[in-house]
Image (spheres, rainbow, N blue to C red):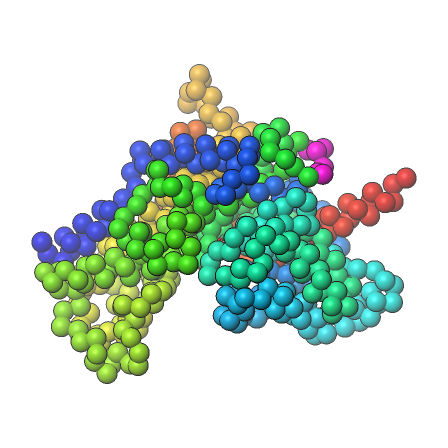
Amino acid sequence: MSLSQKAESIASEFVLSDDDVRKCSKQFIFELGEGLKHVVPTVCQIPTYVTKVARGTEKGVSLAVDLGGTNLRVCSVELKGDTKWTAKHAKRVIPPETMTGSNGAELFHLIAHEIDQFFQLHHRDTLQKLRQSKDVLPLGFTFSYPAYQTSINSGILLRWTKGFDIPDVINKDVCQLLQVAIDDFNLPVEVTALVNDALGALMFRAYTLPLSQTRTSVGAIFGTGTNGVYLEKLSNITKALGTHDDSTGEMFISSEWGSFDNGLLVQPNTKYDMKVDQSSINPGNQMFEKRVSGMFQGELLRVALNELYADPDACLFRGVQWDDPAQGEGPAPFFTRWAIDTSLLSIAAAENAQELTALSEALVKTLRIPANHVSADDVRAVKTIADAIGKRAARLAGMAIGSALIKGGRITVDRNILPVTRVTEDFSGVEAVDIAVDGSVVELYPGFERYMREVWRVIDGIGPAGEKMIKMGVAKDGSSIGAAIIALIVANGRASHTATP
Ligand code: BGC
């Protein structure tokens, strides 16, 4: 077999057929249902206590802190009430030793310190006024890890994901830890809402949509990690819920779908997936995330290429000397975990199979292989495998969004009067469903949406007519502003309750 045939053969292991998609979707909808009945460790279906979507008419000022992947962001937002807003931002990298340290207090002290610095830099006067008037600013805490909520402003951390590992914080209320740290700085700030990034993105998009447009009912992140939130009927949530507003009969649920099918009943599973899982910090967990998100796709590619390289007949990177000084200091990136970033898959997907100049240059740079050892056949082989990994991820992502739409009752096909697709949309008379997405993978991977749409067309319960009704938009970096919006809605709600006798 030639190099290209061997690459094709590896790529074929990543194929997810339409039948596989339908099987996964069935199991996905089942797991979403189970998570509404019991507190399960996998797709844990976290109640968010947010029961209304933003309308774009909200007004006021609030803050947000966003603990995402490696960055910590603080922002203040002013909502103008006409779908417009202004914001000030600050961002810093979280030191790796804090991300995996033993001391949770250190992390929360760092966050509060950033809020303090943010006030000093952008809102010194506001700080003084608030202290004098003894008022507080509401803060939305975007926390992009599974924290089980029993109210809008409390959440017990179930597990860390995406490389964070501070055991000390597990089983603790992250809002309380943040509030204590904020109070230590004597800041007039109240943690009013705990918000997953997927919900933040959704609220941001909903606020910014033209007032006449259908409100957003599903939010999804495909970045370092992955997750989705969707609007569920309260009557379907039969596990215990804390005090909540039941006026809309619905609540946003944060699925934590990164842990879908941890038991690998229906998900595709190659030997490369198994290797990546085994060398991760949480083997056996977040098994869907490990196939779909940006943290893992580059590593999957590296592991698959290592397999190809190990086959002497394939002659990948023929004649390369890994101890060549051109490789630079330290171990060769090709054999080093995480050395290939998922952005390489986007470069591969964007390239025309005939030219491949950008991919070739990226390979030389990333793997520090001298250019004369990277042949056109090598680059083509890399593209073949990279495209297969990227396409599988996008199809799985489409399966997850499509299943959430079906579970939330947003799209229902009336089988008796086929081919009519009836789309249920509660917010306005417009017949469409709106989805907010964010994250580097969905934003930057060429064809990600196209692959998702292909899946929606073949999924039971959506079909070609349903697919056309789905509108999707990137809520770029919307998770912080979305959390600030939710914090403001909560604070305004409280104020109106106290004002009403
Ligand atoms: C976390 C989710 C988060 C997602 C996207 C996952 O690893 O468990 O809470 O929403 O990443 O950031």
What is the number of callouts on the image? Answer: 0
Q: Is residue 246 inside the magenta stretch?
A: yes
Q: Can you say which quadrant of the picture contains the N terminus? A: bottom left
| Position of residue 450 measured from the top left corner of the image (x, y, whole percent) | 38, 45
Q: Residue furthest bottom?
A: 325
In the rendered structure, the answer to whether residue 395 lies left or right of residue 256 reads left
Q: Residue at x 31, y 51 (%)?
A: 273
Q: Is residue 107 above or below residue 432?
A: below
Q: Residue at x 17, y 62 (%)?
A: 310
| Position of residue 275 measured from the top left corner of the image (x, y, whole percent) | 30, 55
| Position of residue 401 measured from the top left corner of the image (x, y, whole percent) | 46, 41
In the rendered structure, the answer to whether residue 121 lies left or right of residue 480 reads right
Q: Is residue 395 above or below residue 248?
A: below
Q: Is residue 339 above or below residue 15?
A: below
Q: Is residue 415 inside the magenta stretch?
A: no
* Magenta segment main secondary structure: loop
The part of the image, by quadrant, that contains residue 444 is bottom left
- Observer able to see residue 133: yes
| Position of residue 280 measured from the top left corner of the image (x, y, whole percent) | 38, 58
Q: Residue at x 70, y 70 (%)?
A: 116
- Observer able to see residue 80: no
Q: Can you say which quadrant of the picture contains the C terminus? A: top right
Viewer-proximal residue among 439 and 20? 20
Q: Which residues are magenta?
A: 243-248
